[in-house]
Image: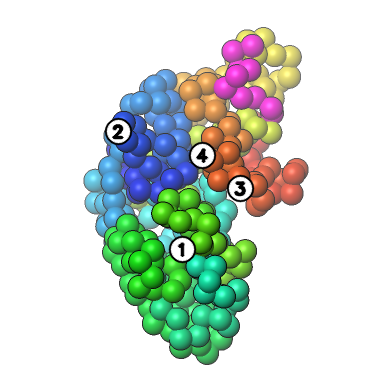
């Protein structure tokens, strides 16, 4: 399986100095590999720039795009793509220096703003500034490393992107204490994977592997306790683990595919805390389970 990722974004898809990969987006790819092959390492990661990510999926250069991509109506209906479930609910934010005094949208008047080309952040920026009738100077980048290098050298006043990306990049600045990510959000950004449309069986696999991590958290099953559940009495857990029924076979997978996913990669909480919660001290918020006030919810495994 070939998975298209960013490889420069901490918490989502990042290539470590030792050549390994980490992040929520990476862990989804590993979870799918675990479901398919019982081996999370049976996946090849391919770095994609923003401008090439969709064509790489549609042309078949990658099997799956897992690169903090926003699901929109236009992308869903006109780009040759299908979007499985969102695996991170985000919003567009603003990274500013503390000395700038910027605290609101109105403070952006006359400012230079760094933004990535071909992203929803770019179109959202145009719309929000037009809505508030504010003049500004956009600096548009194909390469995100260049974007943040430009911001750090004060050649633009503001960097805007998904707030999770800004938090990760903020931690990598030479003087992070001199900057801050505002609490202000200017959009909704449901982030998740994408595949080429016209592949319903593959779509179902990606979709239900995503849900398996959420369902495992709902059932309080994790990578640490899953091996102790060989003979659970709860029929819902028995179906989920493949001990009865044919849930996996309906997807063309082993009936214990969900067990493989959780054993090798973890449930959604484990994935979130490992990549986002612990490194960046970022609360779950909208990414909490539905019963905890969030938006994460799995349909029934039955």
In the displayed structure image, the side of residue 6 where residue 218 appears, left or right? right
Instruction: Give residue 282's mark.
Output: 3
Q: Residues within 10 Å of mark 2 (few under 14, many from 20)?
A: few
- Pointer 4: what residue? 275
Mark 1 / mark 4, whichever is N-terminal: 1
The rendered magenta stretch, by its main secondary structure, is classed as loop
**Quarter that holds the N terminus:** top left
Q: Position of residue 121 (x, y in %)?
A: 45, 68
Helix or strand or loop: what does disc 2 sit on?
loop
The answer to which quarter of the image holds residue 142 is bottom left
Give the class, few, some or many, for how many residues have Cα within 10 Å of label 3's Cα (few <14, many ≥20): few
The magenta stretch spans which residues?
219-228
Q: Is residue 82 visible?
A: no
- Label 1 and label 4: CA atoms lie apart by 19 Å
Tags 1 and 4 touching, CB below 8 Å: no
Structural crowding at the residue carrying mark 1, measured as other residues with C-alpha within 10 Å and reported as few (<14), some (14–19) or many (≥20) = many
Precedes in sequence: disc 3 or disc 1: 1
User: Which element carries disc 3, helix, strand or loop?
Assistant: loop
Report, in whole angstroms, how far the alpha carbon at label 3 lies from the one at label 1. Answer: 17 Å
Q: Which residue is mark 1?
A: 161
């Amino acid at each position: 399986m070939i998975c298209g990722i960013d490889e420069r974004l901490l918490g989502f898809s990042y290539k470590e100095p030792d050549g390994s990969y980490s992040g929520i987006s990476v862990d989804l790819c590993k979870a799918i590999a675990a479901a398919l092959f019982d081996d999370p390492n049976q996946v090849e990661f391919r770095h994609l720039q923003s401008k090439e990510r969709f064509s790489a999926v549609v042309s078949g250069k990658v099997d799956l795009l897992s690169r903090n991509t926003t699901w929109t109506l236009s992308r869903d209906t006109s780009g040759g793509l299908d979007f499985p479930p969102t695996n991170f609910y985000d919003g567009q934010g603003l990274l500013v220096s503390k000395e700038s005094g910027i605290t609101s949208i109105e403070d952006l008047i006359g400012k230079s703003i760094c933004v990535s080309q071909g992203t929803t952040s770019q179109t959202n920026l145009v719309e929000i500034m037009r809505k508030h009738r504010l003049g500004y100077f956009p600096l548009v980048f194909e390469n995100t490393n260049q974007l943040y290098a430009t911001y750090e050298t004060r050649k633009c006043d503001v960097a805007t992107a998904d707030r999770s990306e800004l938090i990760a990049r903020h931690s990598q600045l030479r003087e992070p204490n001199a900057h801050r990510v505002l609490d202000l959000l200017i959009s909704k950004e449901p982030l998740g994977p994408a595949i080429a449309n016209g592949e319903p069986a593959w779509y179902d696999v990606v979709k239900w592997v995503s849900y398996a991590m959420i369902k495992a958290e709902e059932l309080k099953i994790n990578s640490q306790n899953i091996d102790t559940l060989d003979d659970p009495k709860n029929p819902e857990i028995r179906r989920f683990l493949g001990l009865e029924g044919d849930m996996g076979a309906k997807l063309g997978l082993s009936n214990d595919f969900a067990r493989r996913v959780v054993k090798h990669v973890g449930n959604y909480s484990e994935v979130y805390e490992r990549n986002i919660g612990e490194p960046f001290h970022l609360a779950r918020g909208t990414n909490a389970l539905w019963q905890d006030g969030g938006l994460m919810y799995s349909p029934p495994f039955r």
